[in-house]
Amino acid sequence: MSEGAGIEKNTPGGGAQAAALAAVTEEEPAGKRRDIGLKRRYRAEKRFRFYGIAAIIFGLFFLVSLLWSIFAHGFGAFWQTTITLPVVLEAQVIDPDNRLAAEPQSVSDPHFLAMIDYPLLLRRALAQKLGVAADNRAAMREIGQLISPSARGQMRRFLGANPRTIGTVQTIRFLASANVDAAFKGQINFSLPQDKRRISDRQRQWITLLGKEGLLHKSFNTGLFTLAASANAESSGLAVALIGSFYIMLIVLVLALPIGVVTAIYLEEYAGKNSFTDMIEVNINNLAAVPSIVFGILGLSVFINFFGLPRSASLVGGLVLSLMTLPTIIIAARVALQAVPSSIRAAALGLGASRTQTVFHHVLPLAAPGILTGTIIGLARALGETAPLLLIGMVAFIANYPVSPLDPATALPVQIYMWAGEAERSFVERSSAAIIVLLAFLTLMNVTAVFLRRRFEKRQ
Amino acid sequence: MTAKYAAVKPKRVKMRGENVTVFYGNKQALHGVTLDIAANKVTALIGPSGCGKSTFLRCLNRMNDTIEGARVEGIITLDGEDIYAPDIDVVELRARVGMVFQRPNPFPKSIYDNVAYGPRIHGLTKNKAELDEIVEKSLKSAGLFDEVKDRLHDAGTGLSGGQQQRLCIARAIAVSPEVILMDEPCSALDPIATARIEELIDDLRKNYTIAIVTHSMQQAARVSQYTAMFHLGSLVEMGETKIIFTSPKEQRTQDYITGRFG
C-alpha cells in the first residue's frame, strides 16, 4: 500500500495512471485504507523498547555503583606505605653478651635470633634521620609507633640469612605501621584533637618529612598476596586464603566433575525410564536448590564429627563444596547430553558400536563444550561460597601457610568476611581489595567459560 | 489380515520375518508380518505414511531395541538364525546388517575417520595400510572416492547432501555387512543425487542384500526386484516388482499404486 503511495508521489502522471488502473481493475482507489491499528501498535512497541532500555539502565546503575564503591574502597590496599632506611646493625645491640666470640655457630640458633631487640635498631635508625635524641623517651616511643611490628620478623629472617652483616650498615625497607599508612593515604581526620587520633602532630610532621625525602613512599603491596593472617593490618595478606581456595577448587574439580559426568551419562544413556529414575531426577534437581549452609551442617556432622577429619582443613571444605556442586554439574551434563542429536547415536549403533562406544566416541565429545561450561560455572559458584565454610571452621586466624589440604586454612570469601568484621580502617580497606581479587577470579572463570563455549560451537 | 502371496517365495532367502508384531507402548505398529528378504536382491517396502514399513526395517537390525517402550514379537532370522536369541550379540548382528538413514548423518569427524570408524571398532584391520585400503575401496564402491580423494581429512559434514548420503553408504559398506537396510535414503536429496544413489544401489546388489523403504513408487519400480506393500501395520502383498506394479493381486495394492490413497 505504501509502495503504491510512493509511486504516486514520484511520477507526476502516476496519480492519473493509478486512478485509471484502479478504475479498470475495480480496486478501491488509493487513499481509502483499512485501519489495522498501526499507530497503536508502533506506539506500544516504542513504549516497550523504552521500558527495556530503562530497565537496563536501572540495572547497570546499580552494578556500576556497586563496582565503583568496591574499587574506591579497596584500591588503596594494593599500595602499602614502606620506609627505607640505612640501619646500623650494632653488634652491641645484637649481641650484648658477646656470645658470638665464644660460640660463632649460635648465630644460626633460632632462640638467639629471636631474643634480639630489632625494634631498637630500627628506632635508632629513624631517630637519627629525624634528628631525635636517643634519650628522649617520649619521642622514641612515638617513633616506635611508626614502625610495623612485622619488621621484627623481617629483620630476624634477614639476620639469619646474612649473619656476616652484623656490625655493618644495611639499607632495609620495612613496612610502616597501619596508622602511618592511613595518614599517608589521607584517611586520618587531622582536625580532631590530638588525643582523639592515632597519629600525633609530631608524628605527622615526621611522616611529611620522610615523605619529602623519598624515604617513606607507597609501593605495590605484594604482601597482600604473599602474607598470611596477622594482627596488624599492614602485614596481613590473602596467602592462606588463596592457598585454601586453590585446594578447595582442586578437590571440587577432581571429585565433582568425574562423578557428576559419569552419573549424568548413566542416567541419560543407560538407565531405563521408570519411577525410580524419575525419583532420582527430582531429588537431584532439589539438591541443586538446597541452601549452601545445609551442606555446611552436613560437612560438620559427617566429615568432622563422624569421620574425624581435621577441622578447618581445606579437604573438608573441598568435600562439602563438591557435594554442593555435584547436582549443578549433573544437571548441566544431562542437558548437554540431551542436546546431542539422536541421529548421531543411531548412526553409531547402526554400525555395530556398543552403547559404551557410542557414548564415549560420539556423544561425549559433542556434549563436552556444554559440560565444560557447566563445570566452570559450578566452580565459580563454589569459589564464592561462604556459609558452609563457616560451619566447618574455615574461619580461623591462621598465621602459618597450609602445606597440604589437611592443614587448617581459610578461603577467599571467608577472609573477606573476617576482615570486614574488623574495626580497624585498614582491615576494611583490605576487605574491599580481597573482594576485587575474588571478582577478578570469578570474571576470569566466567569469561573463560563463554570463550570456550563459543570456540567449541564454532568448531561444530 | 494375511496376504495371499504365499506362492511367491524368493529362491534364496537372506532374512526372514515370521509373524512379526511390534508395539510402541500401547500402540501396535505391526500386525503379524511375515516377509522374506531375498539374498543379493533389492526388496522395496512401500506403503503410505505410518504403515509400518520403517518399523519392520528397524526390526531387521534390532534398532527397535534402542527405542524406549518398543516391544518386538515374532521370529526374525538371518541365514536361518533367530536374531533375538539370547546368545546373539546385537553388536555383531549390526556389523552384519548395516543401515543407512533417511537424513544423512555423518559423524562430525573427517571423511576418512567416518569410513574408518566401523572397521576400527570391529578390529577388521591389522595396520594403517589395510585401513587405508578399506576406506578407499568403500568410497569407490559408494561412488564418492574421486570427489573426495584430495580431502579425506576434511570434515564429513562439509559435503553436500548427496555426498553425505554416499559417505554414509560408504561407511556402512566399510564394515563388510551382508545386508544393507536403507530407510528412505533419497528422501532428503535432490533428483540428481537420487539418481546417482539409485545407480549405486543397483551396483551394490551384486555383493549385498538390500532392503529399501521408499515412499516413491517410481523408485521402487526402478530399483527393486521384489516389492512388499504395507498398509496400517500389515503386509498387504509381496511379490516380484514387475508383477506388483502391473498386475497386483490385492485391491489395496492396486489402489495405492494408482494413487487412490497414500
Image: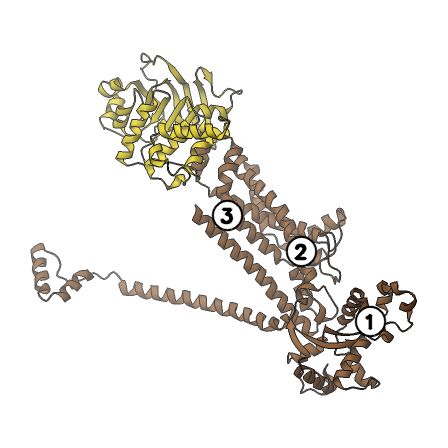
Chain colours: A brown, B yellow
Question: Can the viewer see residue A423?
Answer: yes
- For mark 2, does the 10 Å Cα neighbourhood hold few (<14), some (14 to 19), or many (20 or more) residues? many
Q: Position of residue A208 (x, y in %)?
A: 68, 84
Q: Nearer the viewer, residue B212 or A400?
A: A400
> Which structural element holds mark 1?
loop
Asked which secondary structure carries label 2, the reply is helix
The residue that label 3 is drawn on is: A370
Identify the residue at image location x=57%, y=47%: A329
Mark 2 residue type: Pro
Q: Is residue A215 left or right of residue B75?
A: right
Residue B252 falls in which quadrant of the image?
top left
How far separated are the C-alphas under marks 1 and 2? 50 Å
Which circle's residue, 2 or 3, is located before the other in the chain?
A: 3
Q: Nearer the viewer, mark 2 or mark 3?
A: 3
Question: What residue would you read off at disc 2?
Answer: A388
In the visual, does A423 lie left or right of A12? right
